Amino acid sequence: MSRSLTLKKIPGKPGQVYYPLQLNHNPKPTAGPGELLIRLKAAALNHRDHFQRQHLYPGISFEHALLGDGCGVVEAAGPDTKTGTSLVGKRVLLTPSRGWDSAPEGPEGTFFTIGGHKGTDCGAAQDYVVVPESEVEVVPEYLSTAEAAALPLVGLTAWRALITKSGNALPGRNILVTGIGGGVALAVLQFAVALGCNTYVTSASPAKLERAKELGAKGGVSYRDADWEKQLAALLPKSRPYLDAVIDGAGGDIITRVLRILKSGGIVSSYGMTIAPKMDWVMTAVMKNIELRGSTMGSRQEFSDMVAFVREHKIRPIVSRVVKGLDNMKEIEELYEEIREGRQFGKLVIEISPDERESAKL
């Protein structure tokens, strides 16, 4: 049997409803031609999963397993796989999206994220999943299974927002990362530090600002302060007293707040709007030639490039909390509560089943 965690449909309007979680028992799947059977070991949550429960995300499925971040072990390879037999027994990451191969501008086809979506039964909140052999990447060996599960979706989103979109992922460039503590923001910070950028962060939590500095941030300010942009300006190096780019997941008034310290022609790379589904845009930004670039997830090629970069630089995703058991509904609900309240610093992970190799090290 294979357990899966899904949403249970109840009456309610989008934004007002909050769908309960439901644990199901399903037949164990079998790998077909060109496919891999993966026993999932860990899965991680994202803000997207909280939005799905409020019906604030497109294409919601009440039949397919939730969660777009997953790590597992290849248990079997179906017929006609090119690399399948060599992957049996290895830990792999699920690619978190479908429909986007390599075009840098945007998806070539219908694009969606796995987990609780009508377009695919692939989701990380289940014991077993079958995927095409092309839709996995081997886990960097030094990562724990929880760290590996914390990487795919946020790593891909961060990679595109910083590397592909910002145009400023270069040594010595001044990068502002807003809302540090969330998984994407932390991945951006880690990537930017590895590249030699001067990285600055915002948060409402002094503790999160301090932890970001421990991870390599040059400084940070509280976005609750009315003059936070002035405080940030004072932190910038005298040799380069301006921001080159902002990597933002909040939206709201970020454009008007950073206008004075963002260079002419500077970039705001926006990968989300957690404050509201709108962002202020003013004529002053036009006069200063500021560019606003939307950035959503990324391509299969970008995912491969991101994993290779993580492996090369020995980057470890930040894990905030791990709960054990796909049937541990009480603590899984607590993870959703942490996302809703923004208390986490890093990713929230569900250990679906113990990794025998890690247990052997204890």
Image (tube, rainbow, N blue to C red):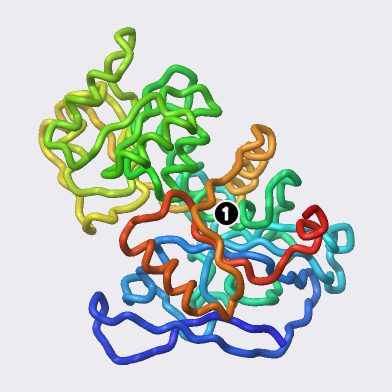
Q: Is residue 251 above or below residue 342?
A: above
Left or right, 347 with respect to 300, comes to left
Q: Quadrant of the image for the C terminus?
A: bottom right
User: Does residue 247 sit above or below 54 in this rendering?
Assistant: above
Between 74 and 329, the one nearer to me in the picture: 329
Q: Which residue is mark 1?
A: 152
Q: Taking 95 as reference, is 128 above or below it? A: below
Q: Is residue 99 visible?
A: no
Whether residue 321 appears in this view of the structure is yes
- Picture residue at 74% right of the left edge, 70% below the top: 38
> Exactly how many numbered labels are in the figure?
1
Asked if residue 353 lies left or right of residue 52, the reply is right
Of residues 103 and 96, the one drawn nearer to the viewer in this rendering: 96
User: How far across and down, in percent of the image, does residue 122 sit?
Assistant: 60, 73
Instruction: Return the x and y of residue 156 as percentages of the image width and height.
Output: 53, 49
Pick the front one: 170 or 288: 170
Using the image, determine if residue 147 lies above or below residue 223: below
Quarter of the image for residue 83 reads bottom right
The residue under label 1 is which amino acid type? Pro
